[in-house]
Every structure is written in structure tokens, then in C-alpha cells.
Amino acid sequence: MATKLPPPGPLLGSSLGPWIRRLPRNPAFWYVAALAAMWPVLHLLPSERVHALRTWASTDLGNLHLWPEGHPIESLTVSVFVPQDTIWVWPVFALSLFAVVGALGARRAVASVALVHVAATALTEGLVWWRIEHGSLPAEAAHAMDTGPSYVVVTALTLAATRARPAWSRAVWLLMLAVAAPALLAGLPDGDTAAVGHLVSLLAGLALAAAHRFGLPPLRRRTPAAPRPETETASGAAPASTPGATDPDPRPARAPSR
């Protein structure tokens, strides 16, 4: 007699339902969604508006200057959502953030990629400042447009290629990193600042992967401690008071009759 199998609909719904409900709590979901939404936005806006947005979000020396001449925090935050070239490919590469969040936890994943983004930007723009001061770059390079999620994505791909779970999935992210590497590192022999920043992001991702592997476990919620046996009996009721035990509110004892 043939066994009647259940319809696939309820099975798929029961497996996908919890995953879909967890999506809004995952920062990777919101970042990928923002990059995907930026694709049509940059195509629909007038070219002068797009240029103004990129100019304001650029992490160049002018914008990174302290207030009121610049706006460093705003440009560092917004620039990771405003790509310049091949806009469609960045949401695909940013999917690696899901693997990073799964391996490190949401808070450690966000802190890791944000730290590398800020550090790589500071190093590359410091290199631009040094080269301007020594005459190898013109003064106009202080306002060269520099936006995009590449530092975040390179860090995420590196962490996913080394820390993703299950282990076989690391090959997928390693392949994507290998595909993107030639374009990201082009110009490195000539000292291109973007290529230097990508190399720094790659090396920082490897260093963070080693740090998380050997010294920084993912953050987990603390489980509540089990009740002590002396404060609760097996039936769940408080133990009865024993003779001679101290009563927190003792009644006055009656004097013996004579």
C-alpha cells in the first residue's frame, strides 16, 4: 500500500515562516534592501541630483573635515549606501552579510564591518593628504568623489569566506571574492587610493576572522539560572518552615497562666 505524502505547501510554509519572521531583525536584510532600492533611485533621479547626493556623501578630505566646514559622520554613514559604478552588483555581493551575521552575531557583524569601513577610509584619505602635502597629487584631489559600499562588502566577503557556516558555503563567498578582486585591486601598483582601501579591507577582514576565531566568540543571550534546590521543592511549592526557624514577623508569645 502506497504511503500518502503530505502536500509540500504546509511543509515549505512551516520551514520558511520562522526564517521570514526573523528577517526584519537581521541588519543584513536592511542593508541589502537599501542597496537594492538605491539602484532604481539613482536611475530615476535627475543627473544633477545624483551628482549632488554623491558629492555630499563623498568621504573626501573636504567632507571629513570637522564641523562646520565638513560633516564626517554623515558622509561616512551615507556613503556606504551610494555606489558609483555597477550599481546592480553590490546587493548581490552584500548578501555575504547574512553569512557574517549568522557566524558572528548581529552586533559583532555590524561593529566589524563598520570599524573596517571607518579605518580604511581614514587610512586612504590620510594617504591622499600626505601625497598632496608632498606634491604627488594636486590640491583638487582633496575633493575627489569617493562613495560606495566596497569597503563594507570586501570585509563581509572576506569574513564570510573564512567564517560562514556551514563550512561548505565558504567556497561560494570565496568564489565571489575571487571574481571581484581583479576589479577591486586594479590600480594598486600605481597607488590608487580605492585599490589601497580594498586591500586594507581584505587584510582587516582576515584579521577580524582570526580574532573572532580565537578570542571573540559571538554574543549570546544569557540563559536564566536554574532555581536553587533549597528555595523550591519538587512540587513547586516553598518548603515548610521548620521548628525553631526565624519568622520574619513573629507574633508575641502569650505569657503562661499561673
Image (cartoon, rainbow, N blue to C red):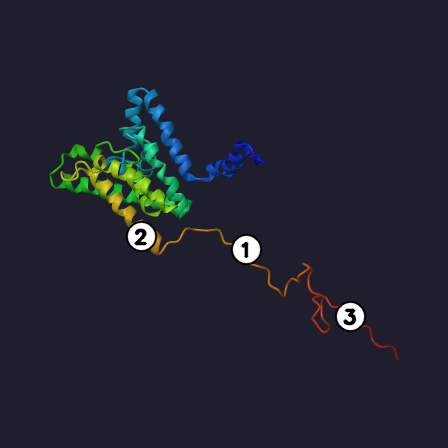
N-terminal of the pair, mark 1 or mark 3, is 1
Separation of residues labelled 2 and 3 (CA atoms): 68 Å
Label 3: few (<14), some (14–19) or many (≥20) C-alpha neighbours in 10 Å? few
Tell me the amino acid under the disc marked 3: Pro
**Which residue corresponds to mark 2?**
210
Q: Is residue 5 above or below residue 237?
A: above
Amino acid type, mark 2: Ala
- Of residues 144 and 113, the one nearer the viewer is 113
Q: Residues within 10 Å of mark 2 (few under 14, many from 20)?
A: some
Pick the quarter of the image with the C terminus: bottom right
Residue 239 tag number? none
Please tell me which residue lies in front, 75 or 68: 75
User: Which circle marks residue 252 in the picture?
Assistant: 3
The residue that appears at 30% across and 24% down in the rendered structure is 50
Could you tell me how far apart the alpha carbons at marks 1 and 3 are, in whole angstroms? 40 Å
The residue singled out by tag 1 in the image is: 224
Residue 66 lies in quadrant: top left
Residue 85 versus residue 202 in the image, above or below? above
**Residue type pointed to by label 1:** Pro
| Label 3 residue SS | loop
